[in-house]
Amino acid sequence: MKQVTATGQTVEEAVESALAQLKTTRDRADISIIDEGKKGLFGIFGSRPAIVKVIVKIDALDEARNFLSQISEKMGAPIEIDVKRDGKHIHFTLTGEKIALLIGKRGQTLNSLQYLTQLVINRYSDQYLTLILDAEDYRKRRNDTLVQLAWRLSQKAIRTGKSVTLEPMPSYERKVIHTALAENKRVKTFSDGNEPHRFIVITPLK
């Protein structure tokens, strides 16, 4: 939250000064008048400046959208963003002619963008929000792939009797693996490592 206290000969001048310092507009600010000021005799003697406090109202979703738009422009892949919100869960769907650039190999670029955008959105939000970035229905296709991967590697762990370590994944992808193998009585799964390089280990049960 950005705020500034400013003075001026009038309330209007103080407000304009504060808005200029914050580089914002009235519709994005909360304005509080601390002192309306006093002109004084002949406008000089006993005069008192007006004092106002202006707080910028920052919309976390707008900041996240702007961040993503700027990044995609710099990558040469401009996008449109469809936003859906369900309580604390935010879903951004990206579309554009060069969307493949933003997905990257095995979704690595999309995951990185999601991680960075989540940092931005929670920097400005007054409550913790979880964010999912999707493009061309990639997340569903990736989930299907992860379920198949979980089954195949669990069979490998059972067959060899050795633990299998997966590549680092974001938390929601690890959850897909954990859920896919939750009912499998022959293996157990756990996460290891530190974000954003945390990974899953599938261990056979004896």
Image (cartoon, rainbow, N blue to C red):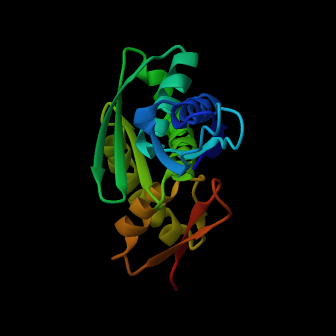
Taking 178 as reference, is 44 left or right? Answer: right
The location of residue 168, given as percent across then percent down, is: 60, 53
Q: Which of 60 and 163 is in front in this view?
A: 60
Q: Nearer the viewer, residue 87 or 204?
A: 87
Rendered view: 199 above or below 64: below
Say which residue appears at 43% left-offset and 16% top-offset. Answer: 98
Taking 80 as reference, is 101 left or right? Answer: right
Q: In which quarter of the image is residue 166?
A: bottom right
The location of residue 203, given as percent across then percent down, is: 55, 74
Q: Which of 126 and 181 is in front in this view?
A: 126
Rendered view: 40 above or below 118: above
Count of numbered circles in the view: 0
Say which residue appears at 39% left-offset and 60% top-offset. Answer: 176
Taking 112 as reference, is 125 left or right? Answer: left
Q: Which of 150 and 6 is in front in this view?
A: 6
The location of residue 7, given as percent across then percent down, is: 65, 39
